[in-house]
């Protein structure tokens, strides 16, 4: 077996440098814990950017996948498969929508949402040809395709990838007035994350989603929420929009829908909106494959049956209060909703990377986002004793260094 050094050297030599990983190699995982080839154990406080909400290798998900491997894995959508229908029904019932379009990665779900919104704009709202506009927010993160990075405000993500797809307008996040001002007769959708994850767990003011919902309704604009990171119990509800007692028009999901095993994503909406998508107008070879469908059904069952929404609420509060109670000169703000938590460091604290590497040395894997923020988003199957263990380490790292 290769040791950690060998693995990192091979990646470094043969891989593109599009990431700057914490220098740790993971070769085994279970629940909230991961191990390196030397047998060192770490607590996973990133959960693959919330794609492992159910915990690593959840037995029920692995079992469902193994069973499916014995019968069918891929058909393409040229033919029906016996797993797609049940999966779509489960996903719609869970989210309270009528229809879903399955894809693989989150970025594909976002691209799908953009296509649906534009077509709806032309065919239903009657926006003139090629004039459709979609409003997005500053500091957004919706994925890595050229269209999506085109409306990113992060220079690192977009520099020298142009020319970009036109038809996007950017407004400040958490600013309903700016939304109302930016809407024109050609606006077809407002694309927004209920909580901005990659931006550093930026939580909008109470009532923000409700206000943007009302504005979108008033102006016949589709509210399209990207819950690829906030969905599936991460923030304490099955979907983050459920905190606000509203419903978006298009819901984009991914990450934890794949149970930490497979890429599974979807754009979910009402039938009258999805009807603009016709045979041949959109698709994906792997989207809706039977293996992914079975995994996603099991991933949903785990969230529901283990009541991970309630657990995320309760343990999220416990973890957040625990971090807030640490008397650290380096904390500017500690914020979170459910088990989506971030520490924002003071300018004097230095770069977050220093702390994520120190945490790694003591057995906690967390990732900095931007220069001064560290996100803590462990799998939702974490327990109170696990959190107590983590808090003791956080106390050491943030009060001594
Ligand atoms: C991760 C993420 C995406 C992109 O998902 P990929 O599977 O990496 O393409 C889109 N939106 C949000 C909010 C995300 O967190």
Image: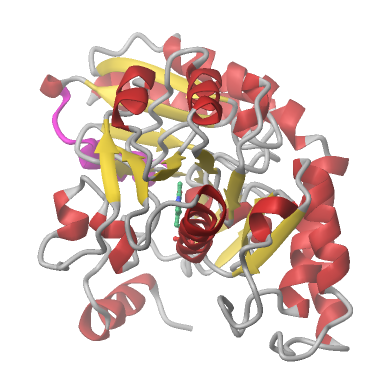
Give the residue drawn at x 76%, y 86%: 73
Q: What residue span does the magenta drawing correspond to?
A: 349-362
Quadrant of the frame with the C terminus? top left
Q: Is residue 362 above or below residue 51?
A: above
Image quadrant of residue 345? top left
295 on left or right of 220: right
Residue 57 visible? The answer is no
Image quadrant of residue 17? bottom left
Q: In this view, does 277 lie above or below 82?
A: above
**Magenta stretch containing residue 356, yes or no?**
yes
66 on left or right of 54: right
Give the residue drawn at x 71%, y 36%: 238
Q: Residue 334 appears at what percent x and percent y?
A: 39, 18
Q: Residue 400 appears at what percent x and percent y?
A: 26, 21
Q: Residue 216 appears at what percent x and percent y?
A: 50, 30
Give the residue drawn at x 78%, y 90%: 79
34 on left or right of 20: right
Q: Coloured how? A: secondary structure
* Towards the viewer: 341 or 37: 341
Residue 199 visible? The answer is yes
* Towards the viewer: 212 or 394: 212
* Towards the viewer: 112 or 31: 112
Q: Residue 251 appears at what percent x and percent y?
A: 60, 46
Magenta highlight: main SS: helix
Q: Quadrant of ligand 1?
A: bottom left
Give the residue drawn at x 71%, y 49%: 270
**Magenta stretch containing residue 203, yes or no?**
no
């Amino acid at each position: 077996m290769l040791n950690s050094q060998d693995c990192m050297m091979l990646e470094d030599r043969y891989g593109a440098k599009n990431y700057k990983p914490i220098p740790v190699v993971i070769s085994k995982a279970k629940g909230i814990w991961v191990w390196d080839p030397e047998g060192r154990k770490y607590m996973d406080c990133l959960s693959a950017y919330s794609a492992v909400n159910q915990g690593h290798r959840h037995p029920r998900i692995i079992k469902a996948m193994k069973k499916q491997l014995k019968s069918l894995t891929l058909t393409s959508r040229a033919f029906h498969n016996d797993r797609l229908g049940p999966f779509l029904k489960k996903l719609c019932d869970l989210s309270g929508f009528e229809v879903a379009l399955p894809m693989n990665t989150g970025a594909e779900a976002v691209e799908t949402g953009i296509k649906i919104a534009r077509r709806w704009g032309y065919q239903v709202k009657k926006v003139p040809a090629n004039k459709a506009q979609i409003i997005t927010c500053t500091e957004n993160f919706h994925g890595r395709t050229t269209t999506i990075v085109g409306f990113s405000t992060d220079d690192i993500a977009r520099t020298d990838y142009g020319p970009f797809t036109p038809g996007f307008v950017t407004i400040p996040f958490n600013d309903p007035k700016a939304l109302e001002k930016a809407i024109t007769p050609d606006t077809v959708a407002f694309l927004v994350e209920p909580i901005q994850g990659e931006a550093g767990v930026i939580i909008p003011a109470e009532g923000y989603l409700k206000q943007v919902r009302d504005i979108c309704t008033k102006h016949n604009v589709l509210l399209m929420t990207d819950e690829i990171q906030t969905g599936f119990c991460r923030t304490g509800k099955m979907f983050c929009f459920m905190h606000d007692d509203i419903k978006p028009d298009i819901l984009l999901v991914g990450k934890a829908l794949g149970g930490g095993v497979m890429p599974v994503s979807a754009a979910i909406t009402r039938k009258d909106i999805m009807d603009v998508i016709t045979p041949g107008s959109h698709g994906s070879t792997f989207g809706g494959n039977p293996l992914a469908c079975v995994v996603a059904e099991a991933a949903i069952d785990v969230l529901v049956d283990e009541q991970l929404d309630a657990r995320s609420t309760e343990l999220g509060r416990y973890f957040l209060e625990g971090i807030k109670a640490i008397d650290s000169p380096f904390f500017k703000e500690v914020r979170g909703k459910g088990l989506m938590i971030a520490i924002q460091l003071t300018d004097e604290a230095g770069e977050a990377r220093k702390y994520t590497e120190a945490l790694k040395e003591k057995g906690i894997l967390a990732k900095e986002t931007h220069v001064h923020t560290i996100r803590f988003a462990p799998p939702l199957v974490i327990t109170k004793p696990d959190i107590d263990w983590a808090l003791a380490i956080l106390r050491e790292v943030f009060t001594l260094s």
